[in-house]
Amino acid sequence: MIILKSKAEIEQMRRAGQIVAAFHQAIAPMIRPGISTMEIEQFAIKHLKDNHANAHTVGYNGYPYATCASVNDVIAHGFPSTKPLRQGDIVTIDIVAEADGWIGDSAWCYAVGEVSDEARTLMQVTKECLERGIAQAVVGNRIGDVMHAVQSHAEQHGYGVVRDLLGHGVGREMHEEPNYPHIGTPGKGFRLKEGMVMTIEPMINIGTARMTIDADGWTARTADGSLSAQYEHTIAITADGPIVLTAQ
Ligand code: MF3
Ligand code: CO
């Protein structure tokens, strides 16, 4: 069942979204060669606490951390690590806050120092995939319209669009119905309605779309070892157009 949110409820969701946005704004200048993703994790825990928010991923299906830190060929759900980030790495940091009983969910990909042109272009195109998806996230469009915009932009660059991890409805729970891959055909799929709140979170690989999961049961990697990037926002569908609740 899709749980539609009233205007008042969408207003209530803003605080969780803004806590997540402020976290990303704060870590952007911290991500340099030498910092570890465990330090980012510690910062996240403090940031959530300071803002009277809960770290929603801790204990979620047994996930142990407040952040996911996905370096280079890791697509998503990487564990924070004490290993320092190195110049040239790219790292996606994903955080889910719960505030006032509502969830905000956003991932952002960061360059560690100077990165290769290949990595920079992947990041740029993946961010554009998110933006193009958001532009289609209007009442009356179908999910196929949104995800076609995402998929076609990535594939024009020869990239693989991950199918095995999904975008999702979000509200009082992190994962609400519906859920959907970041591929689609215009005019197909469920129709977007006023009051839906959902993520768009393309995971885009330089090479194959296929992935493997590490022995830890979480870390999703590209099957061919190619780089992967992700950007994610929590978005409310309203009569006045999409509201990006996690906008920075
Ligand atoms: N942002 C992720 C998502 O879209 C968070 C899930 S990580 C988990 O589903 F560990 F909590 F599952
Ligand atoms: Co999500």
Image (cartoon, rainbow, N blue to C red):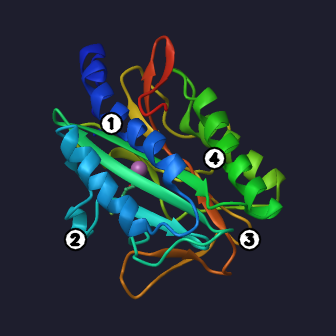
Distance from mark 4 CB to nearest ligand 2 atom below 8 Å: no
Q: Quadrant of the N terminus?
A: top left
Q: Earlier in the sequence, mark 3 or mark 2?
A: 2
Q: Position of residue 24 (x, y in %)?
A: 45, 44
**Real-space Cα separation, disc 3 to disc 2, in angstroms:** 30 Å
* Dot 1 or dot 2, earlier in sequence: 1
Seen at 37% across and 51% down, the residue is: 95
Element carrying mark 3: loop
Q: Nearer the viewer, residue 174 or 25?
A: 25
Mark number displayed over residue 161? none
Dot 1: within a 10 Å radius of its alpha carbon, few (fewer than 14), some, or many (20 or more) residues?
A: many
Give the spatial CA distance, label 3 vs label 4.
19 Å
Disc 1 from disc 4: Cα separation: 31 Å
Q: Which residue is mark 3?
A: 207
| Marker disc for residue 184 | 4
In the rendered image, is residue 181 in sight? Answer: yes
Q: Residue under circle 1?
A: 19
Q: Is residue 231 above or below residue 133?
A: below
Among the 4 quarters of the image, the one containing residue 203 = bottom right
Q: Decide: few, some or many residues near mark 3? Use Cα within 10 Å; few <14, some 14-19, many ≥20.
A: some
Measuring 43% from the left and 34% from the top, which residue is drawn there?
A: 246
* Image spot of residue 220 (x, y percent): 49, 73
Work out how far the residue at label 4 is from the one at label 2, CA to CA, in angstroms: 31 Å
Question: 62 or 34: nearer the eye?
Answer: 34
Ranked by sequence position, the earlier of labels 1 and 4 is 1
